[in-house]
């Protein structure tokens, strides 16, 4: 007796419903079964998140697909699939752009998807996402029994439900009725920016965010420039009981010293020259919510003392006022400096350091995150595809290898800027606007190894050889910055580009060294 292909595909999935499996493995098995039922080149599971679709698992598509976010307004095929309750097969001559053009693995050049099929998934009678199938053979789905796909989609929805239920129970021991809350995300509701990644260190970071987010502890977020400390702060706030209240951010490094107190605590009319009206400070604006102090290590010592008083007592005074006000604020702080070393050097108050770092949280560098670079690249590729009005934007296999081999001293911010530049370079090299634009290693323009600076850099000043390491380093940095600024007629932007750092960071460093 010939085995029923539908039953052959469904039976292992039914068995999986009773098993505790990691989400990635559960969804991988789901797509493998779908591919067994309906042989094709690529399959994907996408979750509906507001007005965009987020890939959760793919087989046969480029790894960077997992980092892409497909806005429905920009992808009419996906929009069309969601508009139907059952499966939809697109005609082979359909003119609607395909979001997967150029993303199918194992094919070089501009080979496009020719046969496309998809089916929406409904959980508790609400649209949850999509299953998509794509083939490079235009006749692949001509004889497909769409009822089989509909039956598979029903079991896929059960798989999704099981995974959501298990995940929810693992996060918190709450009543079953709270499961429904995960499906009640209002359309257009503002969400925190997403932390994208699947590496072990990234998952550890997400676990720590979930752990500390549900507390009232102060968190000191540390990490190199460009790793995404602000996104981590947003995620902590979103995971906290204060999520419905405001998250107020303040970049301490961008403030002139004479305005720090006014920005933090507010001022009354006439408190100083130019104070024509009363103004609430960031603490008052964040009352009941969270205050994020970015680059907190740049605060002057006088402001540090007043900040400590507010953290200890919950009371503040506006500049120029004798009246005290009480605030209820959770403080998150971030720094790319070693604050413990700053304390030892006398540049940061020890009592404030201990008050801020009740829970220290280190954000890993992009180099430590391994293949996460491809997922993040996919996210930035999709952003640039929409910005440039392209139908498809992808990385060649050689370009992917180059991204994986790079050290990423500028971390995620460097990757974001690199993808933006490379997309423009690749587009400018085309005589006409292509259907699929591929970014190769030439457009990336990544060095095989870190290059030396284009202009000769001074040797470490020998007159400082007898100084302690920190003072000698400061003296060397001061000399290097002075010479670079002189070469650029004291213009900060070109000097920052030559030195390979952000303009604002250069200004802050120069100020600390007494150059500004």
Image (cartoon, rainbow, N blue to C red):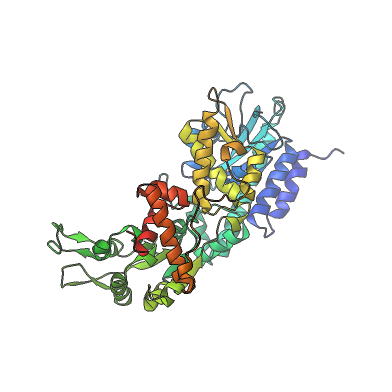
Instruction: Give the farthest residue toward the right.
Output: 1
Where residue 293 sits: x, y (%)? 37, 63
Closest to the observer, 263 or 112 = 263
Where residue 486 sits: x, y (%)? 38, 51
Q: How many marks?
A: 0
What residue appears at the point 38 percent right and 54 percent down from the top-left corner?
504
Q: Residue 92 lies in what quarter of the image?
A: top right
What residue appears at the point 37 percent right and 59 percent down from the top-left corner?
510
- On-image quarter of the N terminus: top right
What residue appears at the point 29 percent right and 62 percent down from the top-left corner?
282
Where residue 20 sits: x, y (%)? 67, 60
Instruction: Give the farthest residue toward the top.
Output: 93
Q: Is residue 256 visible?
A: yes
- On-image quarter of the C terminus: bottom left
Q: Is residue 70 visible?
A: no
Residue 20 vs 383, above or below: the answer is below
Instruction: Give the farthest residue toward the front.
Output: 463
Residue 216 vs 98, above or below: the answer is below
Q: Residue 471 lies in what quarter of the image?
A: bottom left
What residue appears at the point 43 percent right and 66 percent down from the top-left corner?
474
Q: In the image, is 12 to the left or to the right of 90?
A: right
Where residue 221 sits: x, y (%)? 46, 65
């Amino acid at each position: 007796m010939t085995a029923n292909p539908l039953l052959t595909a469904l039976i292992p999935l039914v068995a999986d419903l009773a098993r505790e499996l990691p989400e990635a493995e559960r969804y991988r098995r789901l797509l493998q079964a779908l591919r067994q039922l309906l042989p094709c080149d690529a399959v994907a599971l996408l979750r509906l998140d507001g007005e965009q679709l987020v890939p959760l698992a793919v087989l046969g598509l480029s790894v960077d697909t997992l980092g892409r976010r497909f806005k429905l307004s920009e992808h009419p095929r996906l929009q069309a699939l969601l508009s139907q309750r059952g499966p939809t097969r697109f005609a082979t001559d359909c003119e609607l752009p395909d979001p997967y053009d150029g993303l199918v693995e194992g094919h070089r050049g501009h080979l496009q998807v020719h046969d496309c099929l998809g089916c929406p998934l409904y959980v508790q009678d609400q649209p949850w996402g999509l299953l998509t199938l794509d083939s490079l053979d235009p006749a692949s789905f001509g004889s497909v029994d769409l009822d089989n796909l509909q039956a598979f989609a029903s079991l896929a929805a059960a798989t999704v439900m099981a995974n959501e239920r298990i995940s929810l129970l693992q996060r918190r021991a709450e009543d079953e009725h709270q499961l429904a809350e995960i499906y009640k995300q209002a359309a257009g509701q503002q969400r925190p920016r997403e932390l994208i990644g699947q590496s072990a260190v990234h998952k550890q970071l997400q676990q720590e965010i979930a752990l500390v987010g549900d507390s009232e502890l102060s968190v000191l977020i540390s990490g190199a420039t460009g790793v995404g400390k602000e996104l981590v702060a947003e995620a902590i706030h979103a995971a906290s009981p204060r999520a419905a209240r405001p998250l107020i951010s303040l970049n301490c490094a961008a403030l002139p010293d004479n305005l720090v107190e006014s920005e933090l605590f507010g001022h009354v009319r006439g408190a100083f020259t130019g104070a024509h009206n009363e103004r609430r400070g960031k603490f008052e604006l964040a009352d009941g919510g969270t205050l994020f102090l970015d680059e907190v290590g740049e605060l002057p010592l006088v402001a540090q003392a007043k900040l400590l008083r507010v953290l200890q007592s919950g009371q503040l005074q506006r500049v120029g006022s004798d009246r005290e006000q009480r605030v209820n604020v959770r403080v998150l702080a971030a720094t790319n400096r070693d604050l413990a070393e700053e304390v030892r050097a006398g540049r940061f108050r020890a009592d404030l350091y201990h008050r801020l770092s009740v829970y220290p949280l280190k954000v890993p560098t992009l180099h430590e995150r391994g293949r996460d670079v491809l997922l993040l690249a996919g996210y930035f590729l999709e952003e640039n595809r929409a910005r440039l009005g392209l139908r498809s934007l992808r990385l060649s296999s050689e370009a992917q290898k180059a991204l994986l081999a790079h050290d990423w001293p500028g971390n995620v911010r460097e990757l974001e800027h690199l993808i933006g530049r490379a997309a423009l370079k690749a587009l400018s090299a085309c005589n006409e606007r292509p259907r699929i634009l591929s970014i190769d290693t030439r457009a990336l323009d990544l060095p095989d190894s870190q290059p030396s600076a284009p202009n000769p850099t001074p040797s470490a000043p020998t007159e400082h050889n007898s100084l302690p390491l920190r003072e000698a380093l400061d003296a060397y940095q001061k000399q290097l910055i002075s010479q670079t600024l002189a070469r650029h007629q004291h213009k900060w932007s070109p000097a920052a580009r030559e030195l390979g750092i952000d303009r604002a960071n250069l200004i802050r460093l120069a100020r600390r060294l007494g150059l500004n």
